[in-house]
Image (cartoon, rainbow, N blue to C red):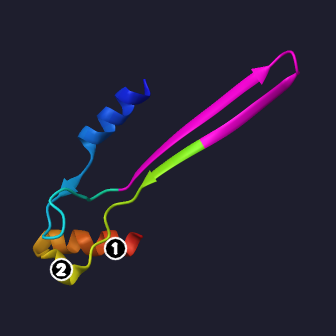
């Protein structure tokens, strides 16, 4: 199930080309996995969480070659970090 979710997320991932990176991530991604387990013999229960965060690429505007909409997008990404 997790592999299917990560494959789906990869297909929906927003990327764009700049002079610095041909597949620069243009969106943030957050994956949260919540786990719980119990041991009836010990009468115990454990819970945990795993959060994976992929932030959109922060790029130096002067080296990115971004213009027009890509420039505005890069500025917004940098501002959001």
| Image location (x, y in percent) of residue 36 | 68, 29
Span highlighted in magenta in the image = 28-49
How packed mark 2 is, by other alpha carbons closer than 10 Å (few <14, some 14-19, many 20 or more), is few
Choose between 52 and 13: the one closer to the eye: 52
Q: Residue at x 76, y 32 (%)?
A: 46
Report the side of 74 relative to 43 (left or right): left
Say which residue appears at 27% left-offset and 47% top-offset.
Answer: 13
Quarter of the rendering occupied by the N terminus: top left
Taking the image as shown, residue 50 lies to the left or right of residue 14, namely: right
Q: Quadrant of residue 55?
A: bottom left
Of callouts 2 and 1, the N-terminal one: 2
Front disc: 2 or 1: 2
In the rendered view, tell whether residue 41 sits above or below residue 51.
above
**Residue picked out by circle 1:** 78
Q: Residue at (16%, 69%) from the top-left corner?
A: 70
On screen, residue 14 versus residue 5, left or right, reads left
Image position, residue 7 (x, y; %): 31, 33
Question: Are the residues tagged 2 and 1 within 8 Å (C-beta)?
Answer: no
Circle 1 sits in a helix, a strand or a loop, which is it? helix
Pick out the residue farthest to the bottom: 62
The label on residue 67 is none
Tag shown at residue 63: 2
Is residue 33 on the magenta stretch? yes
Q: Position of residue 31 (x, y in %)?
A: 47, 43
> 10 Å neighbourhood of mark 1: few (<14), some, or many (≥20)?
some
């Amino acid at each position: 199930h997790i592999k299917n979710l990560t494959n789906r997320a990869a297909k929906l991932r927003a990327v764009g080309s700049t002079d610095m990176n041909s597949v620069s991530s243009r969106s943030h991604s957050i994956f949260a996995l919540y786990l719980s387990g119990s041991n009836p013999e010990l009468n115990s229960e454990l819970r945990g969480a795993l959060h994976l965060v992929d932030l959109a690429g922060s790029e130096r505007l002067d080296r990115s070659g971004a213009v027009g909409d890509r420039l505005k997008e890069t500025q917004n990404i940098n501002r959001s970090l």
